[in-house]
Image: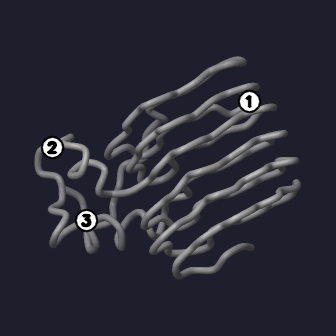
């Protein structure tokens, strides 16, 4: 086994190519990267429950929707996934997962070159950043939140966004 906080990089669990791709009612647990819908017009990501170490959702293209998604290290224990030798929620989750990995590394949602993207009713626990919005225009995000974040809730690097009803606990709200 590697040192605490060491995670082996690997590809996305789900990749989309083209227009109209979707991921609905999925659970992605103990993955380095989750869903990659970059360059996919009219994509839909709905009800994705994840525990990703680097990035849960990476999207781009025109007219996409991300709705009702959750990133939380407790996804394995609380959804009955029962991975062998997974960290105990009561004593090991904070030192071995949240503090060592996700609060220092995980960018929950990344948008790259998205246009007219809608993001709503999404939440993350124990990540570095909830949303990294890079060169995306006309993002509408509402009813989003993060708890116990290690960095910044919303990071914008070019583009435009309207954010309504954003909640966060610790860390900073935007950069």
- Circle 1 packing at 10 Å, graded few (<14), some (14-19), many (20+), is some
Residue 43, position in %: x, y? Answer: 67, 27
**How far apart are the alpha carbons under marks 1 and 2?**
34 Å
Q: Which mark is residue 39?
A: 1
The answer to whether marks 3 and 1 mark residues whose Cβ atoms lie closer than 8 Å is no
- From the image, state whether disc 2 or disc 3 is nearer to you: 2
Secondary element at tag 3: loop
Residue for point 24% across, 66% down:
93
- Disc 2 marks which residue? 82
Q: For the N terminus, which image quadrant?
A: bottom left
Residue for point 33% across, 43% down:
29
Front-most of residues 3 and 84: 84
- First in residue order: circle 3 vs circle 1: 3
- Disc 3 marks which residue? 3
- Splitting the image into 4 quarters, where does residue 83 fall? top left
Q: Which mark is residue 136?
A: none
**How far apart are the alpha carbons under marks 2 and 3?**
22 Å
Q: Is residue 93 above or below residue 74?
A: below
- Splitting the image into 4 quarters, where does residue 13 fall? top left
- First in residue order: circle 2 vs circle 3: 3
Q: Is residue 23 above or below residue 141?
A: above
Secondary element at tag 2: loop
């Amino acid at each position: 086994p590697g040192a605490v906080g060491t995670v082996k990089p690997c590809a996305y669990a789900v990749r989309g190519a083209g227009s109209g791709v979707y991921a609905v009612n999925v659970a992605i647990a103990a993955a380095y990267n989750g869903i990659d819908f970059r360059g996919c017009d009219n994509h839909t990501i709905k009800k994705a429950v994840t525990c990703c170490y680097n990035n849960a959702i990476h999207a781009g293209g025109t007219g996409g929707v991300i709705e009702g998604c959750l990133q939380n290290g407790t996804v394995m224990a609380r959804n009955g996934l029962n991975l062998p030798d997974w960290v105990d929620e009561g004593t090991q989750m904070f030192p071995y997962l949240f503090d060592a990995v996700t609060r220092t590394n995980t960018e929950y949602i990344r948008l790259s070159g998205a246009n007219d993207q809608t993001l709503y009713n999404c939440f993350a626990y124990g990540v570095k950043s909830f949303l990294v919005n890079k060169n995306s225009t006309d993002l509408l995000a509402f009813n989003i939140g993060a708890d116990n974040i290690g960095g910044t809730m919303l990071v914008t690097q070019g583009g435009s966004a309207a954010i309504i009803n954003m909640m966060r606990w610790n860390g900073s709200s935007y950069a």
